[in-house]
Image (tube, grey):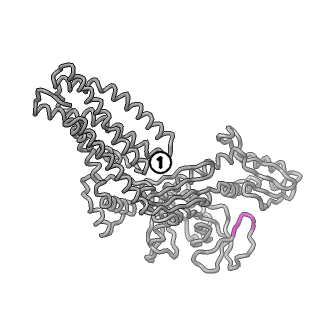
Amino acid sequence: MLDFPVWKRVLIWGLCVAGLLFAAPNLFYSRVESHNDAVQAIERTGTSTPELEAQAAGWPSFLPSGLVNLGLDLRGGAHLLAEVHTQDVYADRMDNLWPEVRNALRAERGDIGTIRRQDSSPDELRIRVSRPENIQAAVQAISDLSSPIVSLTGVGARDFEVSAEGAEIVVRLSEAERAATDDRTMRQSLEIIRRRVDEAGTREPTIQRQGEDRILIQVPGIGSAQELKDLIGTTARLTFNEVTGRTTDEHQPVEAGQELLPSMNEQGVFYAVDTAAVVSGEDLTDAQPSFDQNGRPAVSFRFNPGGARRFGDYTAAHIGEPFAIVLDGEVISAPVIQSHIAGGSGIITGNFSVEESTQLAVLLRAGALPAQMTFLEERTIGPELGADSIRAGALACAVAFVAVLAFMFAAYGLFGVFANIALIINIGLIFGLLSLIGATLTLPGIAGIVLTIGMAVDANVLIFERIREELKTARGPARAIELGYEKAVSAIADANITTLITAAILYFMGSGPVKGFAITLGIGIITSVFTAIYVTRLIVLAWFARKRPKTLEV
């Protein structure tokens, strides 16, 4: 009656062994972490060194190497709260719109006369015309450039509005476009920060939006808040601009639509360039550290098809003229176009070290932040604090574990020992699943494990008490055990399903520490039910088949 099919036994024990194997690397945390970091570094850079190979060989490749990631409160790391200046994007939007407006007004020159861009606020584009009596024709020509947008605040609204103020045409972003731009800016900033942190090989960062214009960034394992700021705070904005002049006078006036930028490599030299870029870093599909023909560190790059086409058309039309490669407001170099550059690839040279060229390639691959950020809050959590938290959490787990083991043995004797064996397997399965899914363990997560230890034996208590009741009805030991498991299953399912629903709600509606608690609690419920219903049953079956007792004491 107690017999299990062979396939069920193999499946149950197989799951237990697999779970324990996935949990095993956590017993050698530093060694496996060093192995994983070396493997990621080799994959990320595409190169290997004897030191990296030695680190990678520190753990057998045929064994699982997944670890339970330690959260910021356990491992230490950096915490930043950044405010994104979404208004910066408005100015870029107006700068990019100006060439289109200028081209549209060329057809109206006979009526409106000359046009000149005027200084204005970031979200405006002002154009003065010499014949204001015909300004409405120009307003209509510019209005035809606007397009409908779909946003939360305006479905079908236009992206910008055009009006006439005296002799000036004023182009303003619509409210709907501002809202859509703000949302796009925040989404893009989140994605770029995530990509930059991931490129650095950091595991399990927390990067999430807070409010309208703020981003919370928590990265475990990083040395300091300043190191994190250096990684994500650099705009790394690469553009290719037309050069209109070269000077050593940093105060030399330039025409509207142009700006004076310093040279990165030529001391005291400034270049006048068009503010509207020919191609930008957003068109980059790849950037890798490399070396130029003279063996100096450089960065090779490749554009997407759209960027490659624009870059090729520009170089074909401006042979013999210089163009500027601009990074974060500085001209890296201003080479003269010798021939048509097709294919959409090239190389950036400068006074780089190998480390600087590698870092620049990382930032360019991750993309440009669309707007500047101000760090409102920054904290560095030292690893010593995390180590203290781990020790305190481990002590709490150990005390709870020993107390539960002692209680089960005192209350149920040999059957309590069976429950204790299942509890040990249960803890292993929890860590195995956490390692498999790459979950992050935090202090609240440790609290969830401690709670699971206490709750894990609840199912066994229900089963054992049910067996006791069946034994009182003068049933034989085999039948009492069978009925005990069968009749307790419904009560076990009801009790654990309600708790699992609570854990799911905490996970989907909570954030940060609450999610960490919900993950360990939810996984603990699943493994507890599995070990109580199946693992202890297999252990009892094996014991009963060998001893064949005539009487049973539970």
Give the tally of numbered discs. Answer: 1
Seen from the viewer's position, the closer of residues 147 and 527 is: 527
Magenta run includes residue 257: yes
| Location of the C terminus (image quadrant) | top left
Magenta-drawn segment:
255-259
Q: Is residue 149 left or right of residue 307?
A: right
**Residue 291 x/y as whole percent:** 44, 72
The part of the image, by quadrant, that contains residue 276 is bottom right
Q: Is residue 293 left or right of residue 339?
A: left
- Name the residue beneath numbered marker 1: 513
The part of the image, by quadrant, that contains residue 25 is bottom left
Q: Where is 337 relative to 458, above or below?
A: below
| Location of the N terminus (image quadrant) | top left
Magenta run includes residue 41: no
At x 43%, y 44%, the residue is: 517
Residue projecting furthest to the front: 410
At x 45%, y 35%, the residue is: 502
At x 26%, y 46%, the residue is: 20
Mark 1 is on which residue type? Answer: Pro
At x 57%, y 62%, the residue is: 235
Seen from the viewer's position, the closer of residues 502 and 432 is: 502
Is residue 119 visible in this depiction of the protein? yes
**Residue 218 x/y as whole percent:** 49, 56
Seen from the viewer's position, the closer of residues 4 and 291 is: 4
Q: In this view, does 191 lie to the left or right of 25?
A: right
The part of the image, by quadrant, that contains residue 123 is bottom right
Main secondary structure type of the part rendered in magenta = loop
Q: Where is 11 relative to 72, above or below?
A: above
**Residue 402 x/y as whole percent:** 28, 46
